[in-house]
Image (cartoon, grey):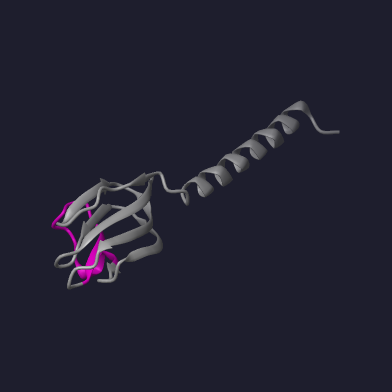
Amino acid sequence: MASLGDILTTQKNGVVAINNVFQALSALNPTDTSATVTASTLVLTGRGRLISFAVVVAGSANGFIYNAGTPGGGTAATALVATPNTVGVYPANMVFTNGLVIAPGTGQSVNVTYSRG
C-alpha cells in the first residue's frame, strides 16, 4: 500500500506537469502587439516568441526582424525573418533570446505580435 508521502508526491508531480503544459501553451498566445514602426526599433529585451508580423505599408525593399538587444544589433546571424515588401500578416512562431528588433525596409511600416518570456 502506498504511503501518504507517495500519494502527495504523485499529486505534486501531476500539478507540476499541468503547470508546464499551461506555460508551454501560453507561450504560443500573443500577449503584446508593437506599435507600427518605420525605423529600426527595439521592441523588447530578453526572451520571448515572435508570433507573427504585419507589413502595413509595403515600401520598396525588404526589412528584417532580429534577435538582438539593441536597435543597431541586427546582423545576418541574428536575423529571425525577412519582412517582404508585400502588405499582409505573416505567421512566424520563432523564439528569440536577446530581444526583438524590427528593422523595416525602405518605406516599410511593420508591427509584430509576440509573447514575453
Q: Residue at x 34, y 65 (%)?
A: 88
Quarter of the C terminus within the rendering: top left
Could you tell me residue 92's position as x and y percent?
Answer: 39, 63
Q: Residue furthest top?
A: 4
Region rendered in magenta? 62-81
Question: Toward which corner of the image does residue 84 lie, by quadrant?
Answer: bottom left
Q: Does the magenta stretch include residue 70?
A: yes
Question: Toward which corner of the image does residue 66 lie, by quadrant?
Answer: bottom left
| Foreground residue among 106 and 103 | 106
Quarter of the N terminus within the rendering: top right
Could you tell me residue 16's position as x and y percent?
Answer: 60, 38
Could you tell me residue 57's position as x and y percent?
Answer: 23, 63
| Foreground residue among 16 and 51 | 51
Q: Residue at x 71, y 36 (%)?
A: 10
Residue 109 as seen in the image, left or right of residue 89? left
Residue 75 as seen in the image, left or right of residue 3? left
Q: Residue at x 22, y 70 (%)?
A: 76
